[in-house]
């Protein structure tokens, strides 16, 4: 927290709910600026307070508004954080393109296959893909023996209905 004193003078407080007893000359008004960081972002405000001169020195005239301008004794300040839900990206027909859900990525690491043609023959039936589609993905320029080449993303069974609305 950082507090910057803007000015000190004698007089009457502009935003005070009451004026402390005593002579005007015995009251010292301090105008200050407070700034601090919170979970909800940075807070910065100007405020003023009064010190009353007593025999043993100046005493702060307490009000809850010293904590935060405009705060009263019945107010409560509370900060809570909530986890945001993932939104959805829809196509123009209202079908979900991206959103919350569970999915599995199915692919091939080319260097881990012993017999590429035999493996592609089994994988194409499982994923309902043409062998040429799989070969095309495996022959991309970026593919190396240790690259994971995504062939298909399979959605959780309950999610499939949401995707075809």
Image (cartoon, rainbow, N blue to C red):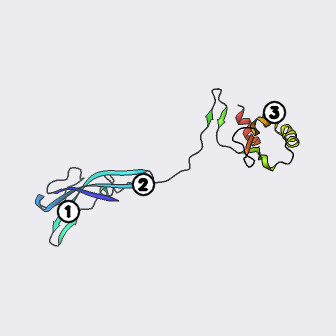
Residue that badge 2 annotates: 38
Q: Position of residue 165 (x, y in %)?
A: 70, 31
- Quadrant of res 18: bottom left
Horizontally, is 14 left or right of 41 in the view? left
Q: Which mark is residue 51?
A: 1
* Crowding at mark 3 (Cα within 10 Å: few <14, some 14-19, many 20+): few
Left-right relation of 124 to 7: right
First reached walking from the N terminus: tag 3 or tag 2: 2
Question: In this view, which residue lies farthest toward the top?
Answer: 93
| Secondary structure of the residue carrying numbered label 3 | helix
Residue 158 in percent (x, y) is at 74, 41
Q: Are marks 3 and 1 in contact (CB under 8 Å)?
A: no
Residue at the (19%, 59%) spot, across then down: 20
Q: Name the residue: 14% across, 55% down.
A: 11
Q: Residue 40 location, x and y as percent?
A: 44, 50
Q: Which residue is mark 3?
A: 132
* Viewer-nearest of discs 3 and 1: 3
Query: Where is residue 62 shown, x and y percent of the image?
Result: 27, 62
Res 76 visible: no
Q: Is residue 101 visible?
A: yes
Mark 1 or 2: in front is 2
Quarter holding the N terminus is bottom left
Front position in the image: 82 or 136: 136
């Amino acid at each position: 927290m950082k507090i910057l004193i803007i000015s000190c003078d004698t007089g009457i407080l502009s935003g005070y709910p009451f004026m402390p007893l005593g002579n005007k000359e015995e009251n010292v008004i301090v105008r200050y600026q407070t700034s601090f960081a919170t979970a909800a972002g940075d807070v910065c405000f100007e405020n003023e307070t009064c010190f009353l001169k007593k025999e043993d020195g100046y005493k702060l005239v307490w009000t809850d508004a010293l904590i935060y301008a405009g705060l009263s004794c019945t107010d409560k300040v509370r900060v809570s954080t909530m986890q945001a839900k993932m939104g959805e990206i829809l196509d123009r027909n209202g079908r979900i393109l991206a959103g919350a859900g569970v999915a599995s990525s199915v692919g091939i690491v080319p260097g881990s296959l012993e017999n590429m043609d035999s493996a592609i023959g089994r994988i194409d039936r499982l994923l309902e893909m043409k062998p040429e589609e799989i070969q095309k993905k495996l022959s991309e320029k970026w593919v190396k023996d240790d690259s994971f080449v995504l062939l298909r993303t399979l959605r959780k069974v309950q999610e499939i209905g949401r995707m075809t609305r």
